[in-house]
Image (cartoon, helix red, strand yellow):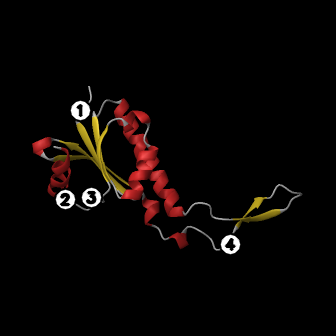
Amino acid sequence: MANGTWVLVSDACRARIFLDRGRGGLEELEGFACPMSREHIRDRVSDRAGLKPAGGHGVRTGASQEVDPKEADAMAFARHLAEVLQRKWNEHSFGELVIAAPPHFLGLLRGALSETVARRVVASFDRDYTTLDLAELSAHIHAHIR
């Protein structure tokens, strides 16, 4: 049987999962970090365009950067969190889910969630609560869902 409500608090480079104990507050269960998102873009990309086949007789053209590296990292982190939540749902670890994340990353998370996990979301906040202490986080969450 599923064990209560989980709260996922995240931004594009870190996330924490809490068990909502109601009046008992929140208990942190797990934390995640996306180390690549903290690097400077200049350390990860070159000024020089790569080469890709043009489809002609051995002609190669410069490749343009199609997705910003930080955006690609954020998308990968959202997918990783969605996979973790799916696995935990399959293990019956939670019954309901609350998500708090900055607006853009919240959209990435919503897009990455499976339909099964998305149906368990009972509230979402387009705010960055990652720096709040447990008491502040609990107050913000419970002011809106209880």
For the point 78% across and 64% down, the residue is 61
Q: Element type at marker 4?
A: loop
CA–CA distance in space, label 3 to label 2: 9 Å
Left or right of 99? Residue 4 is left
Furthest residue in direction front, as rendered? 144
Q: Residues within 10 Å of mark 1 (few under 14, many from 20)?
A: few
Say which label, 4 or 3, has the lower sequence index: 4
Q: Element type at marker 3?
A: loop
**Which amino acid does the dot numbered 4 rest on?**
Arg
CA–CA distance in space, label 3 to label 1: 23 Å
Left or right of 49? Residue 124 is left
Residue corresponding to mark 3 = 129
Q: Residues within 10 Å of mark 2 (few under 14, many from 20)?
A: few
Residue corresponding to mark 2 = 133
**Which amino acid does the dot numbered 1 rest on?**
Asn
Cβ–Cβ under 8 Å for marks 1 and 4: no
For the point 41% across and 48% down, the residue is 109
Q: Element type at marker 1?
A: loop
Say which label, 1 or 4, has the lower sequence index: 1
Furthest residue in direction left, as rendered? 23
Camera-side mark, 3 or 2 = 3
Question: Which numbered tag is attached to residue 135?
Answer: none
Residue corresponding to mark 4 = 48
Q: Which quarter of the rendered picture does the C terminus lie within?
A: top left
Rendering coords of residue 13 (x, y %): 39, 59
Image label count: 4
Say which label, 2 or 1, has the lower sequence index: 1
Task: Classify 30 as above or below 43.
Answer: above
